[in-house]
């Protein structure tokens, strides 16, 4: 993949199904089901965490 003739690093993207969500204070959590269109996982303190988390407003 290139942009303006300069190489661009292609990142691996994997898909998965979220079976349930325990983040009860997240706006995307409805009855322990994630309703976010896309979820980004991040590392926080060397542990995987939800980077899509948004507090209820």
Image (cartoon, helix red, strand yellow):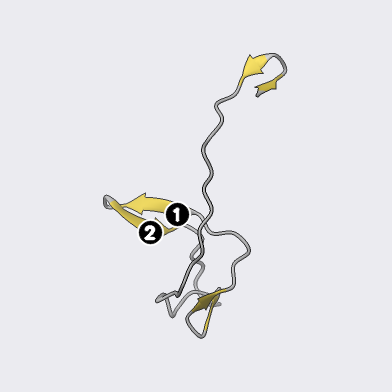
Kindly identify which residue carries mark 1. 41
Please provide percent x and percent y for residue 22. 40, 76
Query: In the image, 44: left or right of 50?
Result: left
Kindly identify which residue carries mark 2. 49
Query: In the image, 8: left or right of 12?
Result: right
Relative to 28, does residue 5 appear above or below in the rendering? above
Q: Quadrant of residue 6?
A: top right
Secondary structure at badge 2 equals strand
For the point 42% across and 75% down, the residue is 23
For the point 51% across and 67% down, the residue is 54
For the point 56% across and 77% down, the residue is 57
Q: Nearer the viewer, residue 45 or 18?
A: 18
Please provide percent x and percent y for residue 34. 53, 73
Query: In the image, 10: left or right of 1?
Result: left
Please provide percent x and percent y for residue 46. 27, 50
Secondary structure at badge 1 equals strand
Tags 1 and 2 touching, CB below 8 Å: yes
Q: Quadrant of residue 3?
A: top right
Relative to 56, does residue 37 appear above or below in the rendering? above
Relative to 33, does residue 45 appear above or below in the rendering? above
Q: Which badge, 1 or 2, is on the more N-terminal residue?
A: 1
Within-10-Å neighbours for mark 2: few <14, some 14–19, many 20+: few
* Residue found farthest to the top: 5
Q: Nearer the viewer, residue 11 or 53?
A: 11
Q: How many marks?
A: 2
Please provide percent x and percent y for residue 45. 27, 52
């Amino acid at each position: 993949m290139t942009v303006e003739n300069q190489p661009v690093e292609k990142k691996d993207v994997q898909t998965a199904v979220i079976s349930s969500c325990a983040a009860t204070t997240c706006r995307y959590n409805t009855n322990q089901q994630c309703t976010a269109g896309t979820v980004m996982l991040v590392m926080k303190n060397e542990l995987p965490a939800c980077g899509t988390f948004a507090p209820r407003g």
